[in-house]
Amino acid sequence: MFKPSLLSILLAGTALLASPATAQETHTVTDRMGREVELPVDIERIATEFLPFPSAWFISTGSADEIVGMHPDSMRMAERALLGRIAPALLGAETGFTQGNSVNVEELLRLAPDVFVSYESMPAIADVERVGIPVLAMDVLSNSGGNVIQTYSGWMELLGQVAGQEGRAADIIAYAQDALERTRTRIAAIPEESRPGALFFARLEQNSLKINGAGHFGHFWVTEGGNRNLAPDGIPPLADIDMEQIYALNPEVMFISNFSPTSPEDLYENRVPGQDWSHVRAVQDKRVYKIPEGIFQWYPPSADAPLMLQWIAQVSHPDVFQDYDIQDVIRDYYHRFYAYELSEDDIQLILNPEF
């Protein structure tokens, strides 16, 4: 006797939900990969494997209630950083439907999402669309060559359309563009020879040293912050490096992403096994900086991207950007866009993230 599979049963249920009797008003948006996607006008349930998405949705709408499922790594970030404090209901979202780059479609269907949000060109897109769930594809590097503010602005424009909050999105984009223009104006006045030579480490661990070359987030942050990226010409956007190469480049400033637990103090005290950092100028001068972490990590595109720009410009050139207190900038941003009043402990958690 034929026994229907769980997936076929769930698919049948999905079809019933989509019947004319319960049809929702829809509209069509163009996602970040140029795909036209038909979505309900009123989005009530979102599932996503896109790690920064909860932060992006929250800033663009002021709500996280719609997110019913997210990647386990996003959940760990929300628990560790500030998103879970600002939107505690988000901590109840499901995570069991996705792991790594894979999506369990049966488990996703149980969440009955109005839309699934995925990375560009992920295999899961076709599988999810096949069961009738619309998919928004979001970009990280593909449309901007690492220009984080451009990526951030594109996300805000799209999500403003998805949520019917175009005015809010326009205000967010205007803030980011103004921060970029003001920073660029000041940096342009700094002679090239006065810009510190820097390396941006996507990974800095005992068995993994990876730096960012042109075309990646780290290169954007380093150069927009008024530094010279010492990553050799022609290397991939994410490239391995060894200690001998680091000695030869001898950076004046170093930045470490949140994808590694290593802290500046680990280098100052030479605590990384098998590596001797005492010969590197940035370590000698104590100009090694750990990237902050607010509503999400500040290294990749996130809802806090304009703050990362202002922070890195100030730590790179404190004399040029001494007219603002970065703590006040952060407080104002969180009040304006998240309706959240940061405590002193919150500020310290952002600027000195715990791992």
Image (spheres, rainbow, N blue to C red):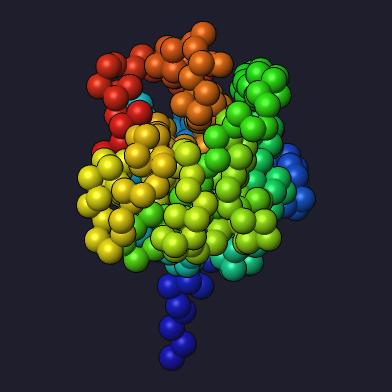
Say which of 234 and 13 sits in front: 234
Residue 293, image quadrant: top left
Q: Image check: 30 left or right of 274?
A: right
Asked if 200 appears above or below 294 in the picture, the reply is below
Q: Image check: 122 left or right of 32?
A: left
Q: Which residue does the image show at 28% across and 42% down from the upper left? A: 268
Where residue 326 sits in the image (x, y, percent)? 44, 17
Q: Is residue 167 visible?
A: no
Where residue 263 sits in the image (x, y, percent)? 30, 43
Asked if 331 appears above or below 62 in the picture, the reply is above
Say which of 57 and 186 sits in front: 186
Q: Which residue does the image show at 46% across and 55% down from the upper left? A: 246
Residue 178, image quadrant: top right
Q: Which residue does the image show at 35% across and 35% down from the upper left? A: 286
- As drawn, the residue found furthest toward the bottom would be 1
Where residue 303 sits in the image (x, y, percent)? 52, 32
Q: Is residue 284 visible?
A: yes
Asked if 257 appears above or below 306 in the picture, the reply is below
Q: Which residue does the image show at 67% across and 32% down from the upper left? A: 192
- As drawn, the residue found furthest toward the top would be 323
Q: If the image is split into quadrants, where does the C terminus sit?
A: top left
Asked if 193 appears above or below 99 in the picture, the reply is above
**Numbered disc total:** 0
Where residue 32 sits in the image (x, y, percent)? 70, 47
